[in-house]
Image (cartoon, rainbow, N blue to C red):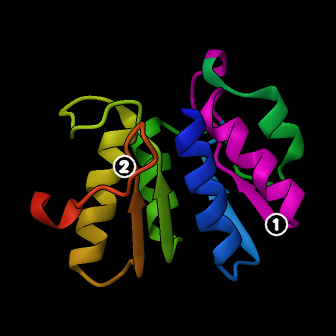
Amino acid sequence: MSRAQYECVSRILGGLDVASAHMGCCVGADEEFATMCSVTGVFLIGHPPEWPIFLSKFARKICDELYEPEPYMARNRKIVSVSQVMIAAPYESKPQQRGGTWATIRMALQARKRRELEFLYVMDRDGNLMDYERWM
């Protein structure tokens, strides 16, 4: 995450009354999110990636509960389906047709449409919340 995204995610997480969080256990932003959760005492549930090269050993160690690795899209669908709140900090500031983060955001948008997801936060590299309603 960019510094601004990290600060925005931290503010959002700090403002929520959550006991647990699900995350993807990949290197990069997932590691940063795992650190935030561990510092705030949030019970962390990890969904590791299918390919070990992208698995964060740190994030995996810090998880309180860990699922078995699954193919990426199945794993991402599961994370969306068990969540009431999704927080996404994509590298790109405009929706992309390719990439796991954007595919997960699209899944979350569909879950919002079906009223299965209560909140969705997507922030750009500058830490600004993006207006995803116009994407729908």
Q: Residues within 10 Å of mark 2 (few under 14, many from 20)?
A: many
Residue 38 against residue 2 in the figure, above or below: below
Look at mark 1 in the image and give the residue it sits on. 43
Q: Is residue 46 magenta?
A: yes
Residue 18 against residue 57 in the figure, above or below: below
Is residue 58 something one can see in this rendering? yes
Which disc number belongs to residue 104? 2
Look at the image and give the residue range highlighted in magenta. Answer: 26-53
Query: Which quadrant holds residue 62?
Result: top right
Q: Secondary structure at mark 2?
A: helix
- Image coordinates for residue 20, horizontal then vertical, percent: 73, 71
Q: Residue at x 71, y 39 (%)?
A: 32
Q: Are marks 2 and 1 in contact (CB under 8 Å)?
A: no
Which of these two is toward me, 125 or 37? 125
Q: Is residue 116 magenta?
A: no
Identity of the residue furthest to the top in this view: 53
Q: Residue at x 22, y 60 (%)?
A: 132
Name the residue type under label 2.
Answer: Thr
Number of numbered callouts drawn: 2
Name the residue type under label 1.
Answer: Phe
Is residue 64 something one can see in this rendering? no
Q: Earlier in the sequence, mark 2 or mark 1?
A: 1
